[in-house]
Amino acid sequence: QVQLVESGGDLVPPGGSLRLSCVGSGGTLRNYAMGWFRQAAGKARKFVATINWTGDWTHVEDDVKGRFTISRDNDNNTLYLQMNSLKIEDTAVYYCAARKSAIVSMWENEYDFWGQGTRVTVSL
């Protein structure tokens, strides 16, 4: 059973940067597509970014395009989300997820394993 643990969430001012990490244990993530989702207070969880198993194909949602970058290190079983030029509306709990498929997905019901989330707060 794969377990995912996110870290890196923090309180940052608008315009700041953070890098979120998601470390997998209990099995290799090498053959899994992975993704980041976020959930703001009182709202449904939403797709942020996804990456294929080799790391050479990514897709990010329009609101974060040009600001967020998803990447992975398969040798260290780790997924990353580099977040730059953060905005107040980026405030949310960020979740990583792994899909038992090499094919990426933007749909949370297609992911099999989830982390517990890490909180990002963007505020003055």
Image: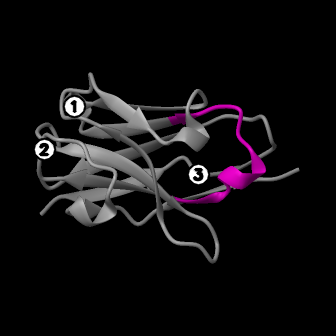
Q: Which residue is mark 1?
A: 74
Q: With respect to residue 8, does 112 lie above or below?
A: below
Q: Looking at numbered disc 1 in the image, what kind of residue is underneath it?
A: Asn
Q: With respect to residue 62, does 88 lie above or below?
A: below
Q: Are marks 3 and 1 in contact (CB under 8 Å)?
A: no
The residue at 24%/39% (across/down) is 77
Q: How many marks?
A: 3
Colouring rule applied to residues: one colour
Q: Position of residue 64 (x, y in %)?
A: 58, 39
Q: Residues within 10 Å of mark 1 (few under 14, many from 20)?
A: some
Q: Is residue 89 magenta?
A: yes
Q: Are marks 1 and 2 in contact (CB under 8 Å)?
A: yes
How far apart are the alpha carbons under marks 1 and 2?
Answer: 8 Å
Specify start and end residues of the magenta stretch as a single range. Answer: 82-94
Which residue is farthest top? Answer: 56
How far apart are the alpha carbons under marks 3 and 1?
Answer: 22 Å
- Of labels 3 and 1, earlier in sequence is 3
- Judge by depth and name the residue closer to the eye, 14 or 26: 14
Q: With respect to residue 80, does 9 lie above or below?
A: below
What secondary structure is marked by label 1?
helix
What secondary structure is marked by label 2?
loop
Q: Looking at numbered disc 2 in the image, what kind of residue is underneath it?
A: Thr
Q: Residues within 10 Å of mark 2 (few under 14, many from 20)?
A: some
Q: Which residue is mark 2?
A: 28
What secondary structure is marked by label 3?
loop
How far apart are the alpha carbons under marks 3 and 2?
Answer: 24 Å
- Judge by depth and name the residue closer to the eye, 123 or 61: 61
Q: Position of residue 46 (x, y in %)?
A: 48, 60
- Of labels 3 and 2, earlier in sequence is 3
